[in-house]
Image (spheres, grey):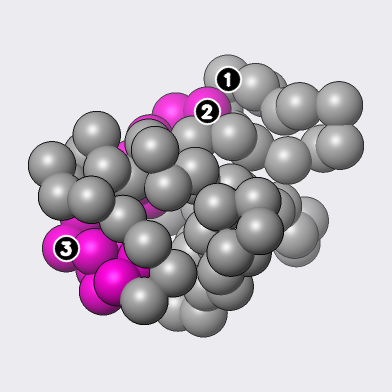
């Protein structure tokens, strides 16, 4: 695991867009990472909604952070400068 990418513990949930937002930091740069409810459901094999999204993320957080870290290292940023997991 590359320790140059650090993830904050806090997440935010956008119920309208059905997204979770995580923040990573790499060499002083703040990177927003987004994870759709659909992708989270694929990872945890459980239906996701606003009420359970945060707790389901915690169950697969290590895997999500590994995926995000790989995408960051590959410079796979979207047009808004975010990483879409």
Q: In this view, does 11 lie to the left or right of 1?
A: right
Q: Tag 1, which secondary structure? A: loop
Q: Residue 3: percent from the left, percent from the top?
A: 42, 54
Residue drawn where x is 72% and y is 28% of the image: 77
- CA separation, marks 3 and 1? 25 Å
N-terminal label among 2 and 3? 3
- Residue 21 is labelled as none
Label pair 2/3, CB-CB below 8 angstroms: no
- Contact (Cβ within 8 Å) of mark 1 with mark 2: yes
According to the picture, the residue beneath numbered tag 1 turns out to be: 74
Q: Nearer the viewer, residue 23 or 50?
A: 50
Query: Is residue 23 at least partly visible in the picture?
Result: no
Counting from the top left corner in percent of width and height, residue 25 is at 64, 60
Residue underneath mark 3: 59
Residue range highlighted in magenta: 52-71
Q: Is residue 53 magenta?
A: yes
Which residue is pictured at 39% across the width and 38% down the height?
38
- Packing grade of label 3 (10 A; few <14, some 14-19, many >=20) is few
Q: How crowded is mark 2: few (under 14 residues within 10 Å), some or many (20 or more)?
A: some
Left/right placement of residue 15 relative to residue 59 reads right
Would residue 47 be seen by someone viewing this image from the given angle? Answer: yes
Q: How far is the residue under mark 1 from the one under mark 2?
A: 5 Å
How crowded pointer 1 is (Cα within 10 Å; few <14, some 14-19, many 20+) is rated as: few
Residue 71 is labelled as 2
| Residue 60 on the magenta span | yes
The answer to whether residue 49 is above or below residue 5 is below
Percent position of residue 72, x then y? 58, 34
Answer whether labels 3 and 1 touch (C-beta < 8 Å).
no
* Nearer the camera: disc 2 or disc 3: 3
Label 2 element class:
helix
């Amino acid at each position: 695991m590359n320790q140059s990418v650090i993830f904050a513990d806090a997440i935010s949930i956008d119920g309208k867009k059905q997204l979770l937002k995580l923040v990573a930091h790499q060499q002083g740069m703040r990177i927003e990472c987004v994870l759709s409810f659909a992708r989270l459901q694929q990872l945890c094999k459980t239906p996701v909604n606003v009420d359970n999204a945060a707790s389901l993320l915690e169950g697969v957080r290590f895997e999500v952070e590994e995926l995000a870290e790989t995408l960051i290292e590959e410079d796979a940023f979207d047009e808004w400068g975010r990483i879409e997991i």
